[in-house]
C-alpha cells in the first residue's frame, strides 16, 4: 500500500480528558475516530490490526475443534425474559421495536441463543461434544463509557459455546480452551495472568479470567511473592457476597474496636494474625444493601477515613454510622437463617488466611464463621487499614480483562429445556461451557504494554503493516524512487508493506511512522544506495541502525518477522 493512496490520518494533539495511553495513541495514530460517546469508527490501520487479532484467534479455536458460526445481532426479548437476564441486565440492554411492535435487544451475549440453537439442531449424544464460536459485534448501554475501546457501548468479541453429554467432557474441553487462550495471548506478546474468578451474570460455578497487565486497567490483581517468584495470584476487583455464615458461639463486648480480641483468641486458641474482624457499618445511601461488612485481620486497625473516602457515606461530617446492638443481633440472626446477604469488603491482607477463622463481628457480638473459599461467592477488596504493614511480600497491579471462560453446567439447559438422548435412550440435560475474548479491548492491552514516547510498537504478528519503506527525497531523486519501487513490489508479494511516497518533510514522515508503530523500517537514501545498501531500523530500538545489502534485505526482513512470531 502507498501512503499517497491510503487513509492515513494522524493527530498531533488529542482531545482533552483522555487519560489512558492506549486511547490517546489510538486516536493519534489514526486507528479510531469517535462518532459518539462510546462509539467508534475503525480506520484502515485499526481494522487491519483487528483482522490480525481475529486471524490468531480463529487459528487456535479451529485447532481445538471449534466450528465458526454467526448468530444475528438482534435477539428476541422472549429468551432473555425466560432466563431472567432481561431483568438482571436492566438498563445495559439496548432495546428496540420492529414495525410489528415486537421488542428486540442488541445482543450483549449469546448464551440463551446458542442453547436454543443446539436444542433445535442436535438430538443425540453422538454429536457431542461440539464447540461453536463466532467473532461478532456486541452492545451494552454503558452508563459511563470510558477509556476508549476498553469500556465502549459497541465492541467486538469472540464468543464460543461448548455442549457436552456430561461434566467430565466439559472439564476436558474447558482445559483445552484454557490452553488455547494462553497460546493466543502469548502469540500477541502479552504479559497476562489467568485468575480464578466470579461467574457473575453469565452464570455457572467455576470460571477463569485472563488479565493483561496494564497501569490503566480497571481491575487489580495481587501478586504474592515467594523467593522473588510469583506463586499466588488473586483477582481483587470483583463484587462478591459471602453467602454462608456458620454460627458457632457468641461473646459480648461493649467496645467496637479490638480490645477483646485477646479474649477471643484464648477461646479459639489462635494468634491475632490468624483471626479476622468484621465491622458492620450502616449504608444509608443504598436501600437494597442497608449494611456493609468490612473485614480486616485481627492484628490490624481499620482506617475509618479510608472507608469514608472510598465509599459513599456522610463525607461532609467525616463519620460513619454503626448499627446498634439490636440491629447487630438481627443481622446475625438473618445471616444464620440465610435471609440476608450483606455486601462484604475485605482488606488485602485477609486474602491469605485459610480454613476456619475466628471472626469478630465488631459491634458488640463475636462469633465463629466459616471463611473457606467454597463459601465465598465473590469479594470486593480495598486497602482499609492504617499503612503500617510491610508490603515486600506482595504487589498489586492494575490489569485489563481480555478473556473469561466459564464452566456453566446445566443452568441454561434447564431454562431452555435442552436435553439429549444418551446411549440408554434416556433424556439428559446438556452441559455447557462459555468462552469469551474481548477482541477490541485486546488492542488497548497490547498498546499499553507496547509503546514509547514516540508512539505504538506493534509486534509483527499484530501490526497493520510488517514493514515500511521510507525513501528520502522520493519525488526528487529518480534512483531512490526506482529502488524503493523495486523493493516495494518484491516485498508486497508475501509481506504486508507500506511505501511512504508522500511529498512531506522527512521529520513529519518519521514522526508518523514511529507513531503508527510499524515494526520494521527500511530507509532508502542517497548515501546508502551508492553502495548498493539500505538502512534498517527496528521500531523497538530506532536508535540502532543496520546497513544491509539491497539484495539481502528481503530475506533479512522475513527472518525478522518469523523469528519474532
Image (tube, helix red, strand yellow):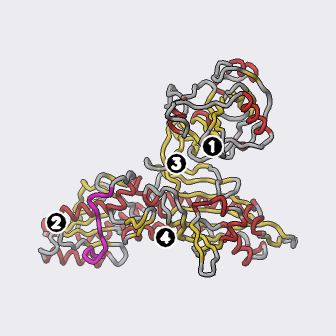
Q: Secondary structure at mark 2?
A: loop
217 and 456: which is toward the camera: 217
User: Is 65 inside the magenta-drawn segment?
Assistant: no
| Nearer to me, 193 or 320 | 320
Q: CA distance from mark 2 to mark 1?
A: 56 Å
**Left or right placement of residue 116 versus residue 216 in this view:** right
The disc, 3 or 1, on the residue closer to the chain's N-terminal end is: 3
Q: CA distance from mark 4 to mark 3?
A: 27 Å
From the viewer's perspective, is residue 563 above or below residue 423? above
Neighbourhood count class around disc 4 (C-alpha, 10 Å): few under 14, some 14–19, many 20 upward = some
Say whether disc 1 or disc 4 marks the residue closer to the N-terminus.
4
| Residue 405 in picture, x, y percent from top left | 62, 58
- What residue sits right under mark 3 in the picture? 219
Mark 3 vs 2, N-terminal side: 3
The answer to the question of whether label 3 and label 2 lie on touching residues, with beta carbons closer than 8 A, is: no
In the picture shown, does residue 390 fall above or below 79? above
Q: Which residue is mark 1?
A: 379
> Please, what is the dominant secondary structure of the magenta stretch?
loop
Q: Earlier in the sequence, mark 4 or mark 2?
A: 4
Position of 349 compared to 49: left or right? right
Q: Which residue is mark 4?
A: 55
Q: Which residue appears at 50% of the width and 28% of the height?
A: 387
Q: Secondary structure at mark 3?
A: strand
Question: How far is the residue under mark 3 from the one under mark 1?
Answer: 13 Å
Q: Give the residue at mark 2.
A: 505
Rendering coords of residue 312 (x, y %): 54, 40
Amino acid at each position: 500500500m502507498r501512503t499517497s493512496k491510503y487513509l492515513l490520518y494522524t493527530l498531533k494533539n488529542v482531545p482533552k480528558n483522555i487519560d489512558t495511553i492506549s486511547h490517546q495513541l489510538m486516536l493519534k495514530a489514526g486507528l479510531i475516530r469517535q462518532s459518539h460517546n462510546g462509539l467508534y469508527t475503525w480506520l484502515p490501520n485499526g481494522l487491519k490490526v483487528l483482522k490480525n487479532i481475529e486471524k490468531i484467534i480463529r487459528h487456535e479455536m479451529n485447532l481445538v475443534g471449534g466450528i465458526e458460526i454467526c448468530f444475528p445481532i438482534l435477539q428476541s426479548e422472549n429468551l432473555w425474559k425466560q432466563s431472567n437476564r432481561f431483568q438482571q441486565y436492566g438498563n445495559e440492554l439496548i432495546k428496540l421495536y420492529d414495525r410489528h411492535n415486537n421488542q428486540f435487544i442488541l445482543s450483549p451475549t449469546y448464551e440463551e441463543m446458542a442453547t436454543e440453537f443446539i436444542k433445535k439442531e442436535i438430538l443425540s449424544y453422538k454429536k457431542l461434544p461440539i464447540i461453536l464460536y463466532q467473532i461478532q459485534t456486541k452492545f451494552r448501554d454503558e452508563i459511563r463509557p470510558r477509556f476508549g475501546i476498553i469500556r465502549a457501548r459497541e465492541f467486538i468479541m469472540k464468543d464460543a459455546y461448548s455442549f457436552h453429554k456430561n461434566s467430565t467432557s466439559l472439564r476436558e474441553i474447558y482445559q483445552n480452551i484454557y490452553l488455547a487462550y494462553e497460546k493466543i495471548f502469548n502469540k500477541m506478546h502479552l504479559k497476562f495472568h489467568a485468575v480464578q474468578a466470579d461467574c457473575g451474570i453469565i452464570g455457572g460455578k467455576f470460571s477463569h479470567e485472563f488479565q493483561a497487565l496494564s497501569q490503566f486497567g480497571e481491575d487489580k490483581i495481587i501478586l504474592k511473592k515467594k523467593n522473588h517468584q510469583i506463586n499466588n495470584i488473586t483477582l481483587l476487583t470483583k463484587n462478591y457476597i459471602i453467602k454462608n455464615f456458620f454460627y458457632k458461639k457468641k461473646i459480648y463486648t461493649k467496645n467496637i474496636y479490638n480490645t477483646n480480641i485477646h479474649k477471643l483468641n484464648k477461646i479459639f486458641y489462635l494468634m491475632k494474625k490468624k483471626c479476622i474482624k468484621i465491622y458492620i457499618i450502616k449504608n444509608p445511601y443504598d436501600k437494597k444493601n442497608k449494611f456493609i461488612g468490612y473485614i480486616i485481620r485481627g492484628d490490624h486497625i481499620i482506617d475509618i477515613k479510608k472507608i469514608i473516602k472510598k465509599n459513599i457515606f456522610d463525607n461532609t461530617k467525616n463519620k460513619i454510622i454503626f448499627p446498634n446492638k439490636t440491629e447487630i443481633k438481627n443481622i446475625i440472626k438473618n445471616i444464620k437463617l440465610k435471609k440476608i446477604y450483606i455486601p462484604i469488603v475485605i482488606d488485602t491482607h485477609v486474602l491469605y488466611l485459610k480454613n476456619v477463622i475466628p471472626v469478630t463481628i465488631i459491634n458488640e457480638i463475636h462469633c465463629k464463621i466459616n471463611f473457606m473459599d467454597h463459601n465465598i461467592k465473590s469479594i470486593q477488596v480495598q486497602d482499609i487499614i492504617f499503612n503500617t504493614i510491610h508490603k515486600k511480600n506482595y504487589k498489586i497491579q492494575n490489569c485489563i480483562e481480555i478473556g473469561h471462560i466459564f464452566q456453566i453446567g446445566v443452568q441454561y439447559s434447564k431454562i431452555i429445556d435442552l436435553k439429549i438422548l444418551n446411549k440408554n435412550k434416556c433424556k439428559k440435560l446438556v452441559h455447557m461451557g462459555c468462552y469469551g475474548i474481548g477482541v477490541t479491548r485486546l488492542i488497548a492491552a497490547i498498546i499499553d504494554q507496547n509503546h514509547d514516547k514516540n508512539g505504538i510498537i506493534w509486534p509483527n504478528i499484530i501490526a497493520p503493516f510488517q514493514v515500511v519503506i521510507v525513501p528520502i527525497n522520493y519525488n526528487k531523486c529518480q534512483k531512490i524512487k526506482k529502488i524503493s519501487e523495486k523493493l516495494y513490489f518484491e516485498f508486497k508479494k508475501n509481506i504486508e508493506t507500506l511505501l511512504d511516497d508522500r511529498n512531506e518533510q522527512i521529520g513529519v514522515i518519521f514522526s508518523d511512522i514511529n507513531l503508527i508503530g510499524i515494526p520494521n523500517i527500511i530507509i532508502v537514501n542517497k548515501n546508502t544506495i551508492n553502495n548498493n545498501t539500505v538502512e534498517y531500523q527496528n521500531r523497538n530500538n530506532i536508535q540502532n541502525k543496520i546497513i544491509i545489502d539491497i539484495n539481502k534485505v528481503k530475506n533479512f526482513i522475513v527472518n525478522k518477522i518469523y523469528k519474532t512470531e
